Image (tube, rainbow, N blue to C red):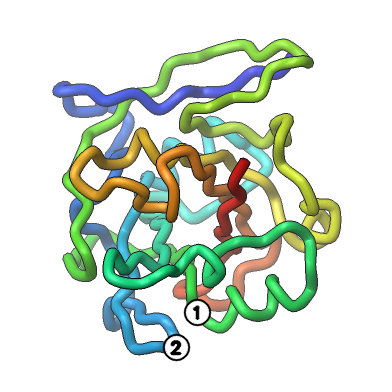
């Protein structure tokens, strides 16, 4: 049995802090771009106060925002820019800047990239059976069924959850390449650069 916190849309402001798909976010410096010069798309952001409560081992600084960015371009095939299945070549390629995870303070709010419609989120505790393959977005540091090739990451990274493409936006169909793609979020155990605090990638069925 695994306990996860499913991300569900809400119209109510979170008492414990901001958590949302899309919109704008707090990021230090310029909006991130990939090596092709394309501005990355903001997928998800969550305040560190909330994330620390959910995954106590993180120890992130309080009152900051963690943001997940990824390459998206509706006019070209971009899945290969962000897919990782455990291969070193894939890892090194993505780390050039095709996805990005950042942390920023509340004084550095910005908007940019292909804008995903903002959706405020709430957390719903949910238990997964050992045979479940979750097709929804959630926060948890329990590795879900379906994720492959992650073993090499565990020495330097902590798993914090997944984003399901269809949850993100009905306007940008396949924001993660395909409507059933799943994006996986890992944070570095040792953060040295606030504009590069983790590794985000997708896998497809």
Residue 1 has which mark? none
For mark 1, give the secondary structure.
loop
Q: Position of residue 36 (x, y in %)?
A: 39, 88
Q: Tell me the quarter of the image containing the C terminus.
A: top right
Mark 1 surroundings: few (<14), some (14-19) or many (≥20) residues within 10 A: many
Q: Residue at x 43, y 36 (%)?
A: 50
Q: CA distance from mark 2 to mark 1?
A: 6 Å
Pick the residue in front: 122 or 15. 122
Q: Position of residue 186 (x, y in %)?
A: 62, 53
Q: Say whether residue 19 is left or right of residue 96.
A: left
Give the image quarter of residue 33: bottom left
Give the image quarter of residue 31: bottom left
Q: Residue at x 38, y 45 (%)?
A: 46
Query: Which residue position holds label 1?
Result: 97
Q: Position of residue 22 (x, y in %)?
A: 25, 49
Query: Which residue position holds label 2?
Result: 35
Q: Position of residue 15 (x, y in %)?
A: 26, 26
Compared to 165, does 124 lie above or below?
above
Q: Say whether residue 58 is left or right of residue 137.
A: right
Q: Residue at x 19, y 69 (%)?
A: 112
Name the N-terminal-most of marks 2 and 1: 2
Q: Say whether residue 29 is left or right of residue 149.
A: left
Pick the residue in front: 102 or 136. 136
Compared to 188, does 170 lie above or below?
above
Mark 2 surroundings: few (<14), some (14-19) or many (≥20) residues within 10 A: few
Q: Tell me the quarter of the image containing the N terminus.
A: top right
Cβ–Cβ under 8 Å for marks 2 and 1: yes
For mark 2, give the secondary structure.
loop
């Amino acid at each position: 049995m695994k306990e996860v916190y499913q991300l569900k849309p809400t119209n109510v402001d979170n008492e414990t802090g901001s958590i949302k798909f899309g919109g704008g976010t707090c990021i230090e410096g310029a909006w991130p771009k990939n090596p092709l010069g394309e501005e990355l798309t903001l997928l998800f952001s969550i305040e560190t106060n909330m994330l620390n409560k959910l995954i106590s081992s993180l120890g992130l600084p309080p009152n900051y925002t963690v943001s997940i960015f990824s390459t998206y371009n509706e006019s070209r095939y971009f899945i290969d820019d962000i897919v990782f299945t455990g291969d070193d070549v894939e890892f090194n390629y993505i780390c050039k800047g095709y996805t990005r995870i950042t942390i920023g303070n509340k004084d550095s709010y910005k908007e940019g990239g292909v804008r995903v419609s903002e959706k405020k989120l709430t957390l719903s505790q949910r238990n997964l059976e050992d045979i479940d393959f979750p097709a929804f977005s959630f926060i948890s540091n329990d590795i879900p069924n379906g994720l492959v090739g992650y073993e090499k990451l565990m020495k330097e990274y902590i798993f914090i959850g997944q984003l399901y493409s269809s949850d993100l936006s009905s306007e940008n169909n396949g924001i993660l390449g395909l409507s059933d793609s799943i994006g996986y979020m890992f944070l570095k155990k040792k953060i040295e650069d606030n504009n590069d605090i983790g590794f985000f990638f997708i896998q497809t069925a």
